[in-house]
Image (cartoon, rainbow, N blue to C red):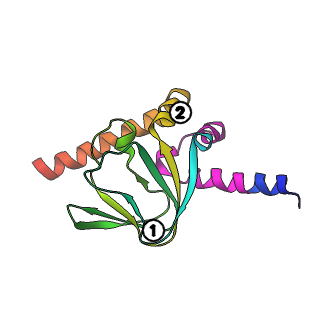
Amino acid sequence: MNGYADGMASKKAYLEHLRNVSLFQGCSTKDLEKIARASDEINMPAGSLIVDQGQTGREAFVVLEGTVGVKRNGKKVGSFGPGTVVGELSLLDHGPRTATVTCETDCTLLLLDQRHFLGVLDDVPALAHKLLASLAGRIRDLDRQYFG
């Protein structure tokens, strides 16, 4: 098997990963290819700090493989696996990180930086709609927590 076919196979697998991310559902293959081009795949060993609560962030991460642990104010909120999006609020503003996230296992992550992401939002309207819906869901959850 030549390297090119191999690269195509891994690219296809990569797009399948993206397709499983709820934030990217409803995106066409063409859209997913644009997202893939605007992002980098990175590997981080277990124990790595991905985002640090209170720090300013300029990028988001999508967990492709592995498990991450999320803490708020030092209290563990949960463990999350593939498809989890971390830090997406930083794609929209330069506010501080709202949680600390670390790799509980060795992880493969997709790194989306703000500059590239805003370009993708212009190109992929489905993603903008999805992101708005996801933020609306978060706001409703917070409302319920505060106001019942």
Q: Secondary structure at mark 2?
A: helix
Neighbor class of circle 2 (other Cα within 10 Å; few <14, some 14-19, many 20+) is many
Report the front residue among 127 and 73. 73
* Residue located farthest toward the left when viewing the structure as drawn: 147
Q: Main secondary structure of the magenta part?
A: helix
Q: Is residue 148 visible?
A: no
Q: Secondary structure at mark 1?
A: loop
State which region is magenta: 10-34
Report the front residue among 73 and 128. 73
Residue at position x 36%, y 42% from top?
90
In percent of width and height, residue 102 lies at 38, 65
In percent of width and height, residue 126 lies at 51, 34
In percent of width and height, residue 125 lies at 51, 29
Task: Report the side of 122 relative to 13 (left or right).
Answer: left
Task: Report the side of 27 relative to 9 (left or right).
Answer: left
State the residue position of label 1. Answer: 67
Residue type at tag 1 = Thr
Task: Report the side of 53 relative to 28 (left or right).
Answer: left
Decide: is 69 above or below 131: below
* Residue located farthest toward the top when viewing the structure as drawn: 122
* Figure quadrant of the N terminus: bottom right
Residue at position x 17%, y 49% from top?
144
State the residue position of label 2. Answer: 120
Mark 2 or mark 1, earlier in chain: 1
Task: Tell me if label 2 and label 1 are in contact, CB under 8 Å.
Answer: no
Residue at position x 50%, y 61% from top?
82
Residue type at tag 2 = Val
